[in-house]
Each structure stands twice: as structure tokens, then as C-alpha cells.
Amino acid sequence: MFAFISTVEPRALFNWTRAGERACLIDVRDREEFAAAHAVGALSMPAHTVDADGIARLLDREAGCDRPIYLLSESGVRAEQVAYRLHRQGLLNAMPVEGGFARWRAEGLPHRRVERIPSIERQVWIAVGAVLLIVLAKAALLTPWFALLIGVLGVGLVVAGVDRSQWLAKWFCRMPWNRTRSPTFGY
């Protein structure tokens, strides 16, 4: 994006650190992205918070000037934008990692992956589906058709929450009342 900004290959950076060079790797992705998975040894500093003063507070006055700092984003674009902003603020030794964390991962370089808590939406699907399945047990005494409907909805919500397949949403998108407008789920 910015031709005058030097970049670094992920493998080269990893090899330098393995050889003993002290390198500061700053992950400029959002905290949620960092929490889900990040390069081993990376520090989290979301792109919108990165500036020369913040770098000096986090590290020291030499970082980005005499000592290089390496910036990591998901694809490398945010890292380049942050590097450009830091260059304008006088930190000329801020270098984005080429290809970002996606390339870091693809090259098999060390990273930590953390299991995440399901989103609120998924938690709701699972909870409502489970309640429907409990009601199903009681409804089975009334009529089998009522029980079948509750069972299908309950299983649909639980499955949608657990594996994100959204087959129930796809089914609702095919209903006649949803055919006149574009589906909300993009199917």
C-alpha cells in the first residue's frame, strides 16, 4: 500500500527471534481477534490506540527509532496503515509483517489459539432450543404433531447454536412470506 514503508517476511522475523535477536512484535488487531489467536510473544495494541507516545510507554523511547518494531494485523493492511501513521509521528523503524497473522498461521509459525465463548446470539439459540426440547417432552402427551413441531424447532436452534450451520434460518428464508424480499442471512 505504502511503497516507502519496509516490510518483513514472517518466516524471517521468526528466524531472527529464534537466533536470539530481540524483536518487538505488536499485534494491532482488536482485542477479541487477539484473544482468539495470536502469535507467540506478540503484544496486543489495537490499531486505533497505536501512536508514538503509546509505543514509548509500552516499550521504551528506542522502539521504532533505533530498534525496529514489527506490526501484525490479520492480512497486513491495518499494520501498514499503523506503520504509515507511526512514520508520520517520527517512528521510521516500524515495519508491518507481510501477509499479517493469516500468513503467519499459514506458514505454521508459533501461535496460540484460545477457545472462545459462543456469541450471545448462539447462546440464545442453544438456550431456547434446549427449553423447547424440554417442553417437547411435556407436549408429547397432547398431540404428536405439536410435539413434532416443537422438536424440529428445538433441534434446529440447538444445532444452529452449536455448529453455526443455520439450516433453520435457510429453511425460513424459503418460506413464501420471505420470498418477496431479500433474505436477511444472505442465502
Image: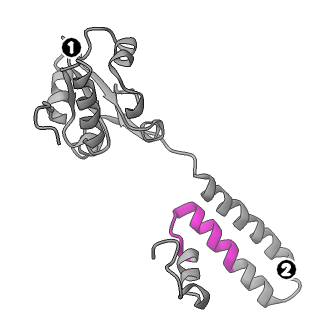
Q: Residues within 10 Å of mark 1 (few under 14, many from 20)?
A: some
Q: Residue at x 57, y 51 (%)?
A: 118
Q: Say which element carries label 1.
A: loop
Query: Does residue 18 show up?
Result: no
Disc 2 crowd rating (10 Å Cα; few below 14, some 14-19, many 20+) is some
Question: Magenta part mainly helix, strand or loop?
Answer: helix
Q: Position of residue 41 (x, y in %)?
A: 34, 25
Residue denoted by label 2 = 139
User: What SS does tag 2 mark?
Assistant: helix
Residue at the top extreme, as displayed? 61
* Front disc: 2 or 1: 1
Q: Name the amino acid, label 2.
A: Ala
Q: Position of residue 15 (x, y in %)?
A: 16, 27
Q: Is residue 160 magenta?
A: yes
Q: Is residue 145 above or below residue 110?
A: below
* Residue positioned 23% across, 15% down in the render: 22
Farthest front residue in view: 88
Kindly identify the residue that appears in the image at 25 percent across and 9 percent down.
62
Q: Is residue 154 left or right of residue 46?
A: right
Tell me if 69 is positioned left or right of 153 in this view: left
**Side of 24 relative to 168 (left or right):** left
Q: Nearer the viewer, residue 165 or 173?
A: 173
Q: Residue at x 83, y 82 (%)?
A: 140
Residue 65 - label: 1
Boundaries of the magenta span? 152-167
- 74 up-or-down from 120: above or below: above
Quarter-wise, where is residue 89 in the image? top left
Residue kind at label 1, given as amino acid type: Cys
